[in-house]
Image (tube, grey):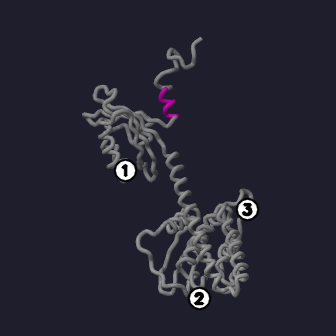
Amino acid sequence: MTSDTDDSHPDWGLEQFHRAIEAAGVALWSWQVDTDRLLMDRYGYALWDVTRDVPLSFEHLSEKIHPADRDRVRAAFSATRAIIGPYEIDFRILVGMEVRWISARGQGNDDGMKNRTMTGIFLDVTGRKQAEESQELLAGEMSHRVKNLLAIASGLTLITSRSSTSIEDMTKQLTNRLTALGRAHDLVRPLPSGQGHAALLGDIFTVLLAPYDDDGAFAGRIRVAVPRIGVGEGAATGLALVIHELATNALKYGAMSVSEGTLDVSGTMIGDDVEIRWTERGGPEVIAPEGPGGYGSKLLRRTLAGHLGGTLKHEWSSGGLLVTLRIDGHRLSS
């Protein structure tokens, strides 16, 4: 009996081999070093989104490489003939608006070269790279949140000391604020599926901002008036992150950092969108930061655009900070 993987089997050949490597996300390439002629298998042409109709050179293929990686890849590819043993290099390519990660692997030092032709493989490692980037973003976000929580605890201690009449009173107020902060922090985590709307928009603001009011929830310094609209469990986490970041900045640098400061949060419906105006007054003079901003600014914009389909605008004035949030109403309720 002949084995299914025996070389003598009539169906076992190049076609089977190509199907196997395509299933593994592997593309074969060969490069004629004297003529700069580059050949790939059919999966390679599809991976790079190039046509077989015209001769392909390494320089031509390099135009598909991400501009930030192009010089590095060209230099590395030219140096491969001097490398002893196998080599590997990862880089990005652009396919329309899509970014793909490619891992090029081969054997250096002219090892095994025939007819002045080098051979190797391209691997599509986009999924792995995206997972790595997600892990890095998550680690950065968690580090940022821990630093913010420490800053918030310090700030809450300060504002509590200003309004306390005794150590016992300060202890009670601070405990209540830290407990409220814990409830607010729970909103930054997604709800289990099947629980419907996470909360009303106004309730989310109320819970998240309660720890920052000197005299209890919205008795004096903080006012909230937003449309009565449900926030879906998918959007609640992103919205909570945005509010939490704005409140942290207000406590560290803005109106909540001084006893005279006030915060007004108002909202209106504009078509299907929700516009929220975050207005700080009575705090230190605010100045627009130079450059692209820190991790907190990037987190705000990424969350607004990615989770809520929205935009963010800052207006820096001598009277205080005004932040305008524009959120897609359909995304907010989903």
Does the CB distance between marks 2 and 1 fall below 8 Å? Answer: no
Residue 32 percent location from the top left of the image? 29, 33
Identify the image quadrant of the C terminus.
bottom right
**Magenta region, residue range:** 17-23
Mark identifier at residue 196: 3
Q: What residue is shown with label 2?
A: 260
As rendered, which of 83 and 309 lies closer to the eye?
83
Question: Is 308 a magenta residue?
Answer: no
How far apart in space, not on screen, are marks 3 and 1 (Cα)?
45 Å
Q: Is residue 233 above or below residue 274?
A: above
**Residue 270 in view in this figure:** no
Q: Please provide percent x and percent y for residue 169.
A: 72, 83
Which label is found at residue 148? none
Disc number placed over residue 69 in the picture, else none: 1
Give the percent coordinates (x, y) of residue 232.
68, 64
**96 w.r.t. 301: above or below:** above
Check the image and report above or below for 181 versus 216: above
The quadrant where residue 223 appears: bottom right
Query: Of discs 3 and 2, which sits in the foreground?
Result: 2
Q: Is residue 37 left or right of residue 180?
A: left
Residue 20 in the magenta stretch? The answer is: yes
Residue type at tag 1: Asp
Q: Residues within 10 Å of mark 3 (few under 14, many from 20)?
A: some
Give the amino acid type for the residue marked by disc 2 in the picture: Glu
Q: Main secondary structure of the magenta part?
A: helix
